[in-house]
């Protein structure tokens, strides 16, 4: 979430984490939602930069963060399933 302040990053990250939590039916708390959203945005923006594509604005970054958070939840479930 390049170019956003800390407060807006936390708000967008929390919203993105909450949306991903609902989409993926994954039960987390507020702090984990924020972490999922912010890290998801980093992962999503990294993947998009590899392809040579970037999305700007609040809505674009929210979409990228939700997609990245969903990928993180999928990865967590994959590793969780292997260790059990």
Image (cartoon, helix red, strand yellow):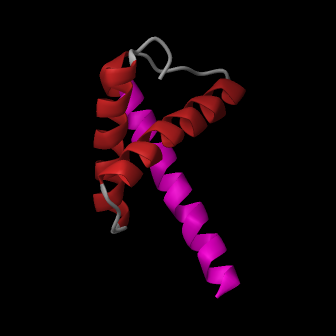
| In the depicted structure, whether residue 76 falls above or below residue 43 | below
How many numbered marks, from 0 up?
Answer: 0
| In the depicted structure, whether residue 16 falls above or below residue 78 | above
- Would residue 47 appear left or right of 32 to someone viewing this image? right
- Would residue 62 appear left or right of 64 to someone viewing this image? left
Residue at 29% x, 32% y: name it: 11
Quarter occupied by residue 27: bottom left
- Name the image quarter holding the C terminus: bottom right
| In the depicted structure, whether residue 36 falls above or below residue 58 | below
The residues colored magenta run 60-84
Quarter occupied by residue 21: bottom left
Quarter occupied by residue 57: top left
Q: Position of residue 77 (x, y in %)?
A: 55, 71
Q: Where is residue 23 in the image (x, y as percent from the top left)?
A: 32, 59
**Which residue is at the far bottom?**
84
Residue at 39% x, 21% y: name it: 6
Residue at 46% x, 37% y: name it: 38
- Along the line of sight, which residue is nearer the eye, 3 or 70? 3
| In the depicted structure, whether residue 40 falls above or below residue 54 | below
Q: Position of residue 56 (x, y in %)?
A: 43, 16
**Which residue is at the far top?**
3
Q: Does the magenta stretch include residue 46?
A: no
Q: Is residue 71 magenta?
A: yes
- Along the line of sight, which residue is nearer the eye, 30 or 23? 30
Q: Is the magenta stretch mostly helix, strand or loop?
A: helix
- Would residue 78 appear left or right of 56 to someone viewing this image? right
- Would residue 31 appear left or right of 48 to someone viewing this image? left
């Amino acid at each position: 979430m390049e170019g956003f302040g800390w407060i807006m990053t936390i708000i967008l990250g929390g919203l993105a984490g909450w949306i991903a939590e609902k989409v993926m039916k994954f039960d987390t708390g507020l702090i984990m939602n924020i972490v999922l959203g912010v890290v998801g945005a980093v992962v999503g923006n990294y993947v998009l930069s590899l392809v040579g594509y970037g999305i700007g604005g609040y809505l674009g970054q929210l979409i990228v963060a939700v997609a990245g958070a969903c990928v993180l939840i999928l990865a967590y479930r994959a590793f969780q399933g292997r260790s059990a």
